[in-house]
């Protein structure tokens, strides 16, 4: 569903879309989200953006909702930790990775703060990459791609696991695939595809409101929007759906024309607060492309809300 609000003088239009995360669930998921009951609210949100204040560019603390953060996780963590990409096998089509070479990154790269744990799995209920066995016939495991802020594991298939034998032996682990093989159909060759990749909730039972209350000058961003990222997944820019100005621990108004710029390690290391278990949500996409010939898979990314300090914000509506 996409809702478009148009100003009375036809000089501006604003959209509200992607309100419901794609999910591997049945019809009960549609009923649970009450499309008819929520339609007015979503329309009002689109209309409110018409009168929103155009953001002043500069640095702000960001509070990111899970339905915004899933895409940032996908692009800045999910893709660069694919082992084939890190080894150069995707260079001709989808690019390479700043998380390379493996011998200089595993156990060494400080991806984020100690509160940051990123799990790869194919087991989360409702996850789009959730499955019993991968297309190599391997039962997937749950593994920490990032453990207490440190880069800990690549996504692997049965073919790829021996490439990291030295790392597994050094840490007393078996040389075993994480179960990330996938083929789009019976007539496609399986290769390494992304599992569910998620930011685990924190130990403290914090909610979105707790993060807002602790923020003096910031922006709350909800929903996913446009993005741009380089071939190494290092420099990027992300938008959103809804933007709210935060002052003195309170939401004080609606903003528009907002996008945040990041360098992946700097951005994740600026994260200083995350929500607890009850604030955790799944987002994701039905359409993640990779390979030549290209194949498409579906993948989920869960997270709690999180706060990032001193992030650069640009105004996307400003004319040259």
Image: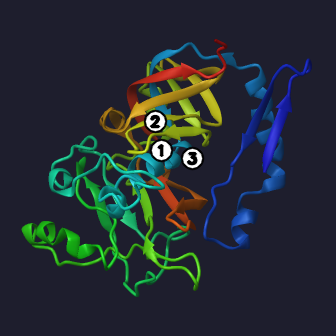
- Horizontal and vertical percent position of residue 201: 38, 52
- Horizontal and vertical percent position of residue 212: 48, 29
Q: Residue at x 50, y 22 (%)?
A: 313
Q: Residue at x 76, y 27 (%)?
A: 48
Label whose residue precedes the other's in the sequence (2 or 1): 1
Label 2: how many residues lie within 10 Å, few (<14), some (14-19) or many (20+)?
A: some
Label 1: how many residues lie within 10 Å, few (<14), some (14-19) or many (20+)?
A: many
- Asked which secondary structure carries label 1, the reply is helix
Q: Is 275 in front, or is 25? A: 25
> Residues at badges 2 and 1 in contact (C-beta under 8 Å)?
yes
Q: Real-space Cα distance between discs 2 and 1? A: 9 Å
**Residue located beneath label 1 in the image:** 72
Q: Is 319 in front, or is 37? A: 319
**Residue located beneath label 3 in the image:** 67
> Residues at badges 2 and 3 in contact (C-beta under 8 Å)?
no
Q: Quadrant of residue 263?
A: top left
Which part of the image, by quadrant, shows the C terminus?
Answer: top right
Residue 5 as seen in the image, left or right of residue 59: right
- Asked which secondary structure carries label 2, the reply is strand
- Horizontal and vertical percent position of residue 99: 28, 49
């Amino acid at each position: 569903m996409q809702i478009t609000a148009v100003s009375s003088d036809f000089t501006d239009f604003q959209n509200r879309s992607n309100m419901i995360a794609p999910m591997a669930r049945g019809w009960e998921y549609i009923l649970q989200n009450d499309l008819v009951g929520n339609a007015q609210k979503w329309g009002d949100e689109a209309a409110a953006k018409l009168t929103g204040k155009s953001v002043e560019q500069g640095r702000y603390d960001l509070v990111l909702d899970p339905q915004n953060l899933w895409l940032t996780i996908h692009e800045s963590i999910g893709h660069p930790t694919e082992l084939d990409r890190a080894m150069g096998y995707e260079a001709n089509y989808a690019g390479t990775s700043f998380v390379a070479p493996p011998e200089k990154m595993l156990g060494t790269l400080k991806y984020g703060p100690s509160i940051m744990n990123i799990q790869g799995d194919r087991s989360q209920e409702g996850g789009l990459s959730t499955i019993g066995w991968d297309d190599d016939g391997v039962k997937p495991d749950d593994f920490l791609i990032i453990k207490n802020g440190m880069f800990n594991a690549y996504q692997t298939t049965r073919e790829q696991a021996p490439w990291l034998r030295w790392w597994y032996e050094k840490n007393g682990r078996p040389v075993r695939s994480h179960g990330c093989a996938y083929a789009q159909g019976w007539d496609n060759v399986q290769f390494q595809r992304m599992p569910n990749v998620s930011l685990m909730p924190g130990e403290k039972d914090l909610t979105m409101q707790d993060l807002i209350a602790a923020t003096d000058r910031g922006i709350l961003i909800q929903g996913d929007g446009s993005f741009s990222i380089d071939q190494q997944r290092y420099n990027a820019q992300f938008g959103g759906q809804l933007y709210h100005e935060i002052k003195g621990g309170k939401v004080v108004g609606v903003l528009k024309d907002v996008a945040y710029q990041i360098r992946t390690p700097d951005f994740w290391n600026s994260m200083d607060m995350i929500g607890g278990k009850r604030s955790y949500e799944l987002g994701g996409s039905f359409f993640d492309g990779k390979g030549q010939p290209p194949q498409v898979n579906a993948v989920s990314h869960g997270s709690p809300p999180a706060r990032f300090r001193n992030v650069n914000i640009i105004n996307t509506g400003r004319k040259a």
